Amino acid sequence: MKRRTTPSLAHSFLRAAFVLAGAWLLPFAAPPSTVALSEKAYNLVLKQGDPAPEFDVTALDGSRFTTADLKGKAVVLNFWFIACPPCREEIPRLNQLVEHFRDQPVVFIGLAADPPPLLTVFLKKNPFRYHVVPNATSIANRFGIDGAPTHVILDTQGRVVHFVRGAVKDVGTELRPWIERALAGSE
C-alpha cells in the first residue's frame, strides 16, 4: 500500500507563489489559439510607419488621451505591470527620459495591466512620471503586445516609429534617439 504524503508548508507556499505569479503574467499572455503565432502577429501589428491602433484611455490622474488628440506630439507608450521585475527596474531611467524631454511635445503613457488600487499603492512607493493608465490589457491586445516591458514610440502623425520588447541594458539610451526621431516626424 502506497503511503500518501502531505506537502510541506514550504511546498504549499511555493505552489501558491507560482500560481499568483502566473496570475500576474496572465494579462499579457496570448490566447491559447495564438501562442504559436504570437511573435509573428506581434511583428505584423507593429510595423514601422503604420498608424497606431486607435485608443482612448484615462490615466490615474484623470488625464484623458486619444489617438486623435495626440497628433502633433511624439508619444512614448510603456506596456508594463507591477509584478514584472524588469518593468520596475527601468522606472528610474524612464523618469529621466521624461525629465530630459519635459520642454518638448512628448507624451509619456504607462499602460499597466494592474487595477487602480494596486497601482496607487505601488506608485506611492515608486514614483513613475508617466501618465499611468490602469487595466490596459485591452490596449496591449490592440497593439499586439504579448510581453512586458514593451515600449512603442509614435511620431507626431501617430505612426509607429520604433518598438522595444523586453528588458534592455539601458532603456534611456535605447529610446532617446527614437523619441528625437519621432519629434522630427520621420519614420
Image (cartoon, rainbow, N blue to C red):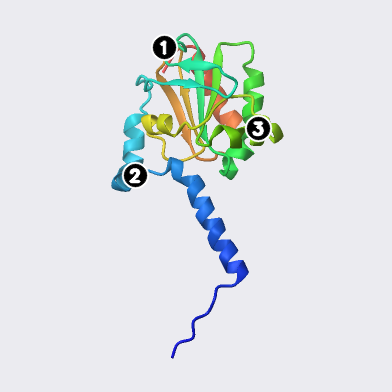
Tell me: 20 left or right of 129.
Answer: left
Query: Farthest bottom residue?
Result: 1
Foreground pick, 28 / 50: 28
Between marks 1 and 3 in the image, the one whose residue lies nearer the viewer: 3
Task: Determine if residue 142 is in view.
Answer: yes
Q: CA distance from mark 1 to mark 3?
A: 28 Å
Mark 2 neighbour class, 10 Å CA radius: few under 14, some 14 to 19, many 20 or more: few
The reply to whether residue 169 is visible in this rendering is no
Q: Residues within 10 Å of mark 1 (few under 14, many from 20)?
A: few
> Given the image, on which type of amino acid does mark 1 rest?
Ala
Identity of the residue drawn at 42% across and 32% down: 140
Point out the image quarter for the C terminus: top left
Residue beneath disc 3: 123
Q: Nearer the viewer, residue 77 or 178?
A: 77
Label 3 crowding class (10 Å Cα cut-off): few <14, some 14-19, many 20+? few
Residue 39 lies, in percent from the top left, at: 35, 41
Q: Is residue 45 left or right of residue 135?
A: left
Name the one closer to the observer, 31 or 40. 31
- Residue that appears at 49% across and 16% down: 65
Q: In the rendered image, which residue does mark 1 sit on?
A: 68
Residue 37 quadrant: top left
Q: How many marks?
A: 3
The percent coordinates of residue 158 (x first, y second) are 41, 16
Report the residue at 52% width, 23% height from top. Answer: 76
Which secondary structure, mark 2?
loop
Relative vertical location of residue 17 with respect to residue 178 in this rendering, above or below: below
Residue nearer the viewer, 79 or 168: 79
**Which residue is disc 2 drawn over?**
31
The kind of secondary structure element at disc 3 is helix
The amino acid marked with disc number 3 is Leu
